[in-house]
Image (cartoon, coloured by chain):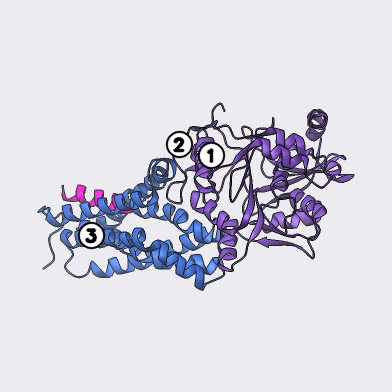
Chain colours: A purple, B blue
Amino acid sequence: MRLHLFAIAAGLLLAPALLHAQVVYKKTSLYRNIVVTDDGHVRCLKFSVHRHVPLEQSCIYDFNRDEMVFPYTEYAMSGVILDPHPQRILIAGLGGAVLPYTLHELYPKARIDTVEIDPAVVDVAKRFFDYHPAGTQHIIVSDARVYIKHAIAGGEHYDMIILDAFNGDYIPPHLMTVEFLQECRKLLSSNGVLVANTFSSSDLYDSESVTYKKAFGWFLNVKGLSGNRIILTRKGEPVSPAELQKQAADYPHDLGRFGIDIDHIADLASDKVDWNPDAPVLTDQYAPVNLLNGPRGRGSH
Amino acid sequence: MFRGLVFALVFIAGYSVMSIELLGGRILAPYFGNSIYVWGSIITVFMLALALGYLAGGQLSLRRPSLRKLGLVFALAAAAIVPLVLFAEPVMQWIFASIYDPRYGSLCAALLLFLLPTLILGVISPYAIRLLVATTAESGQVAGKLYFVSTLGSALGTLTTSFYLVLYFEVNHILLALAGILLLGGVVAWTARLPSAVPEPA
C-alpha cells in the first residue's frame, strides 16, 4: 500500500514536470503522430495529443530505466502472478518497450516476441528508449492478428500473451472480437495467461467484458485510479481474487526495483460483474468498437 | 419518370460501391490486419474494377441500350455480392495459407472478393449516360448530372455505413441488404415500361 501511495505522489509531482517537457523527436508515421518528450527526469512516448482523450503514453525515468512510471504498466505485469515461470511471452504493441524490457530483466531466459504494426515505433523504441532486442528477444513488425494467425498455423504456443495495442484514440476493431480472443486462446499453452491493457468506457466496457467472458469463460479486472483496465485471465479453471492474492504472496522474485508491488496488484483484482451481461458480443461481423467508445458511448463508468 | 428512375438507379449503384468498399476493410482485417497496405489493396482493386467497369459499360452501351438491360446489370451486381457472404471466409483462409506476405495476400483477397461486383457496378454509370443523352450538345451536362448523383450516392454510402450501419448490423447483413436493394432496382428497371427519354436507336 505504501508503494501505491508513493506512486500517486510521484504522479502528482510529475504532472507539472511533464507540462514543461521538451520535445526531442516528432514524426508522423503511417499510423499516427509520434512525439518523444523529455523533461530531464522522465522520457515519454506519446501517440497523439487530443483534448478529450486520456493521454496514452509510455514513459521511463531517465536515470532509472528499471522503475516503472505508470501504474497501468505495473498492473500489466499481473500475468506473472498466474505464471511465475513463463518460457515464451508474446506482447502485442511495443510502445516505449517498458513491458518487454522489464520482462526480459525478470526472465532473461524467456523468449519474448513483441509484435508492433508501426516500424516508426520500433525505431523510436531503439533510439530513444534504449531497447535493443537481442538473443531471446525479438520484434516482429506486423499486425498482431496476422502474426497470431501465422503463429497458430506454425504450431507455436506462448505461456503468456499481453495485449497492449490500444491507444486512447483508436482501437483496432479486429483485436477486440471474440474470434480474435479465441485465436489468442488457441495460441496459449495449457494454463497460458492472457493480459489485456484496455481503458474502455461505458458501452464498450460492457461489450468488451461480455466478449472476454465468452472467449475465456472468466477473467479478473485489475483497475486502479488511472482509468485503465487490465483484464487478466488464463486458459483453464477460474482463479478467484483470494487465490490470486495467495499466489502473489508466493511469487518468487523481488519486483521492488521495478517499483512493482505485486501484492497490491493482486489486492486490486476483482471478479465482480460490473458490466451489463446483455451487451452484444463483439464479433468479426459486429465490432463497432470505436463508435461504442466514442462520443456516443462515452459516459460515466 | 424515365430520367428519375435512371438517376435513382445510379444513386443506388454509387451508394453500394462505397458501402462495400468500407465493409471490405472489416472483411479483410481478421486475416490481413488493419495495416495501411490493406486499405491500399482495397482501394487499388476498387479503382481497377471501376476502370474496367466503365470501359465495359461504354462498350455495352453501343449495342441496343435499354433500361431492361440496365436492370439486368443490377441483378448481376446483386448476384456478385452474394459470394462475399458465402465464400469470403474460405477464400481468405486459402489465400492466408498460400501467401505469407500480407500485402500480396490482401491484394489477392481483394481481387478475388471485390473485383467482380465492383466491375459490374462500374458498368452502370456510362450505360446510364447513354440512356439519357439525346443530343451531343447536352451530353456533357447529362454526364455531369450523373456523376453528381452517383458520387453523392457514394458519399452517403460511405457516411451511413461507417457512422451507423456497422453500429446496428452485422457486415453480412449489410451486404445482403445491398444485394437486395440492387436486385429490387434491377426488377423495377426490367419491368418498368417507361417511354425512353431518348429515341430508341434503330
Question: Which amino acid does the dot numbered 1 rest on?
Answer: Ser
Q: Report the span colored magenta.
A: B1-15
Q: Is residue A137 above or below residue A162?
A: below
> Do the residues at pointers 1 and 2 share their chain?
yes
State yes or no: discs 1 and 2 in contact (Cβ < 8 Å).
yes
Tag 3, which chain?
A: B
Where does the image place residue A146, in percent across and percent down from the top left? 56, 61
Query: Where does the C terminus of chain A fall, quadrant-wise?
Result: top right
Is label 3 or label 2 in front? 2
- The image shows residue B196, relative to residue A264, as above or below, that is below
Residues beneath discs 1 and 3 located on the same chain: no
Say which of A207 and B31 sits in front.
A207
Where residue B75 is drawn, which disc sits there? 3
Question: Is B159 on the left or on the right of B30, as rendered?
Answer: left
Q: Judge left or right: residue A176 versus residue A197.
A: left
Residue at the extreme bottom: B98
Image coordinates for residue A254, horizontal then vertical, percent: 84, 44
Relative to residue A13, is residue A168 drawn left or right?
left
Q: Which residue type does callout 2 highlight?
A: Ala
Residue found at x 47% / y 59% = B28
Residue beneath label 2, please?
A: A279
Taking B65 as reference, is B171 above or below it? above
At 47% from the left edge and 69% from the top edge, which residue is drawn?
B95
